[in-house]
Image (cartoon, rainbow, N blue to C red):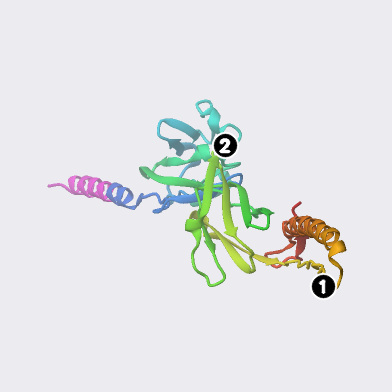
Amino acid sequence: MSWKSWVTQICFVSLLIIKASYSVEFEISVPREPQLAIVGQYVVLDCSFPVGKAWDLDNSVITWQRGLEVIHSFYHGQDQLDRQSSHYTNRTSLYHSEMKRGNASLRLDRTNLGDKGDYTCSVSTLLGSKTKTFALKLAAYYPEPHLKFTASSRDVELLLTSQGGYPRPSVHWLDDSGDDVTNNTVTNISEDTQGLYTVFSTLNLQGQVNETITFVLKNKALGQEIRREITLHSANERSSVEKGRISGDNKKRWTILVPIVTFVLLLFVLLINHHLSTKHHQAHKSSQTPLNVLYNGEKDKTFRNI
């Protein structure tokens, strides 16, 4: 075999080795776990690739898709958005200055619940081509709960409302001892037009109340926990009724006994009427028992139901 044949074979083998090494080395990286975005904020969908010495911007193609939906495309050295889904219009961008370092990440602005799903990053360069998919999840923080309550001489009803969170939260109520009293509550969760949730949770307490109740709302997706203490104090007003007494004179003559007895009976009827009227007035005052409420350590206020 001539030396030229040896050189040709050596070059051919070298090219195969180089091509094989490129194929092995070209591997794009995306998140292994679902990525989390906050509703209304931007999120960077991570994707990176190896560049090597043979990387060329004009010969590189980067495409982001969700299923068959095109989110963002880049080729011929610039963004190509003619086929972009209208759902993502004016909300996507790539890091052009970072591409030479292997950054194919996508920035998605003003996220909403409609952005949930599986995202695919595709990269093709002179070194090779690769496609990988990962999930994007959305979440939203629950705002500070709003407290509303009604009170009477018989019971106290507490209503806490928090609007605009995601996903569905867990809600618990605890008593003074830390025992869970959630079974004594009613919690309703509604969904608005954007898919966000509003929580309405009601606790009813019977009789006179002097204790601290704790409301706990958890958003597991974000690690959010809202814990609020509500301290209740009832003050009873007492009233007294003086009862009159009547004494008769047994030494009076029988001739005036009948008028006296009649007078006494009449006075007795008047006293009974007065007693009943006083009890009614006392009950009315009892129904106006003040209730002092201290919500989460803030200055307490006295509310009176009439």
- Residue 152, quarter of picture: bottom right
Q: Amino acid at mark 1?
A: Asn
Residue for point 42% across, 47% down: 54
Whether residue 299 appears in magenta in the rendering, the answer is no
Above or below, comparing residue 170 to residue 130 in the picture: below
Q: Which residues are magenta?
A: 1-17
Which residue was labeled with disc 1?
A: 250
Above or below, comparing residue 305 to residue 82 in the picture: below
Residue for point 83% across, 63% down: 257
Can residue 167 be seen here? yes
Whether residue 15 appears in magenta in the rendering, the answer is yes
On residue 194, the disc is 2
The disc, 2 or 1, on the residue closer to the chain's N-terminal end is 2
Q: How many marks?
A: 2
190 sits left or right of 273 in the view: left
Q: Nearer the viewer, residue 303 or 56?
A: 303
Above or below, comparing residue 8 to residue 266 in the picture: above
Q: Amino acid at mark 2?
A: Gln
- Residue 108, quarter of picture: top right
Residue for point 50% across, 62% down: 181
- Give how far apart the Cα atoms at labels 2 and 1 are: 88 Å
The secondary element bearing badge 1 is classed as loop
Looking at this rendering, what residue extends furthest in the top direction? Answer: 82
Give how far across and how far down residue 77 sits, in percent.
Answer: 53, 36
Residue for point 61% across, 50% down: 162
